[in-house]
Image (cartoon, coloured by chain):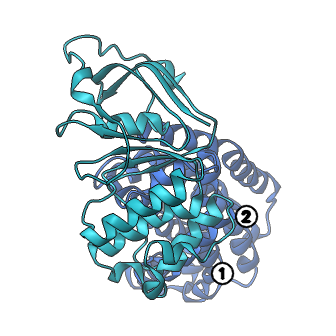
Amino acid sequence: MSLRVEGLSVARGGVPVLDGLSFTVEPGQALVLRGPNGAGKTTLLRVLAGLAPPLAGRVEMPPESAAYASHADGIKATLSVRENLRFWADLYARPWAEGVLDDFDLRSLAHRPAGTLSAGQSRRLGLARLGVIGRPILLLDEPTVSLDAASVARFAGWLRERHLASGGLAVIATHVPLGLDAPEFDLSRFRADPMVAGQGSDAAFL
Amino acid sequence: MKALLLRDLRLAVRAGGGFGLSLAFFLIVTVLVPFAVGPEADTLSRIGPGVLWVGALLATLLSLDRQFALDHEDGALPLIATSPLPLEAVALAKAVAHWLTTGLPLTLAAAPLGILLNLEGASFPWLVLTLALGTPALSVIGTFGAALTVGIKRGGLLLSLLVLPLYVPTLIFGAEAARRGAMGLEVATPLLMLAGITLGALALLPFAAGAVLRINLR
């Protein structure tokens, strides 16, 4: 159960942004993606999640093992916190574990409609989805946005002690230090020349 | 698939879910037609089945743009796409949820609303039967249209323009079968064509919708 990337090139809106990426993340490891805005962190994570095809190169991981968490949490305002999480558990065919509510400090909010949560509380609910669906490879895009310091520490603790310690791995794009013992990967070194390539193919439509 | 279906049904009946929207629109159209056409009982009972079919079709159209747009806006769609459920099954679950919250209530409401249009007694069973057979096709075709326009902001107009021509065969055979049934004529041909359209749409369009969703998610 490891994530292996070889010679990966990715494009956003048809324009190449990253070229020649290679790295391996082993179980129990986290990799922190660094780079200025627009460096291609989100694009890379979407390709790793299988939402967008790579321009070139390979991504190797066991099938159906990755979970993607984007800026948007996909929370339904009219469902309660518990209903939101139970939906993800059912969709991923996972048993419902009540303990997730404690891991992400949502116990006292469990019956509230998600629409009444604050931005930070919504974010905690969005991250709790990762605890519910139990996927070993986490692809996290700015997971700490709008979290307070205590919540950042709580999430980093969950990541370290629950996820990584049990053999999971994570690729995290973040500007905030999470206090993880994780190597950093600077994407600005792999910036693609936007004038090169951009040769789309019709293969996807056939 | 059951999880997604149950969630969509639950969302539809909660506040702002749009469950009553189509039904209310259907009611308004049917109530207004006698005022516009005039009170001649003969005219009304002659055009009744056709009016109810057009009303049901437009009411279905009204709720289509919520199909994927809401999940796209709040970011749930990429998260659903990375789940074990294939996008084809996602499209089918969405279509079934749409039919249960739109097509089925419209079918059931058509009979009482038919009284307002002075439908003859023999018309009622045929109207309900053709709507029950035809509205699933409207939901599946509409879901495909919604999948095509999912990335487009305010894509409602484009969605309507794309879907309306695809609705025409269902409307023709549905209204024709209802009309013939009411007049005691041979109904087998339009009825079979209507059932064929529904089955064909159900069998093929979830795959088409899954494919366009995959492209639109990039």
Which kind of residue does numbered mark 1 sit on?
Leu
A78 vs A172, nearest the viewer: A172
Q: Quadrant of the C terminus of chain A?
A: top right
B138 vs B113, nearest the viewer: B138
Residue A171 appears in view? yes
| Quarter residue A40 falls in | top left
Shown colour of chain A: cyan
Q: Residues within 10 Å of mark 1 (few under 14, many from 20)?
A: few
Badge 2 sits on which subunit? B
Return the mark for residue B204: none
Q: Which chain is blue?
A: B
Which kind of residue does numbered mark 2 sit on?
Arg
Residue B194: give x, y in percent of width and height: 71, 54
Residue A194: give x, y in percent of width and height: 20, 18
How many numbered marks have been drawn onto this rendered protein structure? 2
Residue A128: give x, y in percent of width and height: 47, 66
Badge 1 sits on which subunit? B
- Direction from residue A7 to residue A162 in the image, left or right: right
Task: Identify the residue position indicated by label 2 in the image.
Answer: B180
The residue drawn where x is 43% and y is 85% is A109
Q: Quadrant of the N terminus of chain A?
A: top right
As helix, strand or loop, the secondary structure at mark 1 comes to: helix
Task: Identify the residue position indicated by label 1 in the image.
Answer: B108
| Quarter residue A10 falls in | top left
Q: Measured along the vertical axis of the image, is residue B61 above or below residue A56?
A: below
